[in-house]
Amino acid sequence: NEFRQSLRSLAVGGAPKFQDKIRRDIELILEKGISSFEDMISLLQNDSTSIEVRSIIYWLLGRIHDDRALPVLVESFDKESVDDLIWEIAKSLSIIASSAASQSIISTSVESPSSAKRAAAAYILGRLSGRAVSDTLLRILKNPDEDEVVRGHAAESLGALRNKRALDVLIDA
């Protein structure tokens, strides 16, 4: 099947030192009977799917070049509560980040009760652009009550965006 072959080809394009792990991870997913994007999403939504398998699926969603992955990742980012999975989603979102996701990510970065989720959101925002993104990251960085890890990711993201307005705040941080 073409979908299964496209997943297997991801290992070939990966860094040589990670190719074996990527191959094993993809084979684990394929052993679950995955033969389409829809199958992957169904497995992801199944409550009995292990964290390991969900993590692999989130990783794959950032790399399969399918437009349907973005809304799935954004929705999953909002709902997910396992820190390791939140970060796997964040890494994939940072690869396929688009302005379409920015409002949801901005909201999460400010409103989530989870500091891990706020930190991951700040990380993702560094791969987006726009005044609202920069303003949000500046607000996070200036907030002395914010978790230091969250503020650290906000600072890193502002640096990645090369936002000149952030320069004084970054120096003071």
Image (tube, grey):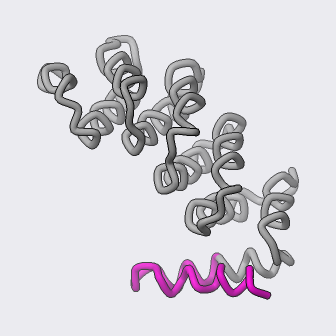
In magenta segment, residue 4: yes
**Residue visible at 13% across and 20% down in the picture:** 168
**Residue visible at 72% across and 64% down in the picture:** 53
Query: In the rendered view, would you say 92 is above or below 128?
Result: below
Query: In the rendered view, would you say 85 is above or below 6?
Result: above
**Residue visible at 17% across and 29% down in the picture:** 164
Quadrant location of the N terminus in the rendered image: bottom right
Query: In the rendered view, would you say 161 is above or below 39?
Result: above
Q: Residue 35: x, y in percent?
A: 82, 77
Quadrant location of the C terminus in the rendered image: top left
Along the line of sight, the residue nearer the viewer: 60 or 146: 60
**Residue visible at 40% across and 21% down in the picture:** 136
Q: Residue 170: x, y in percent?
A: 18, 26
Q: Residue 82: x, y in percent?
A: 65, 43
Left or right relative to 102: residue 134: left
Query: In the rendered view, would you say 71 is above or below 12?
Result: above
Residue stretch in magenta? 1-25
Q: Main secondary structure of the magenta part?
A: helix
Q: Residue 51: x, y in percent?
A: 71, 56
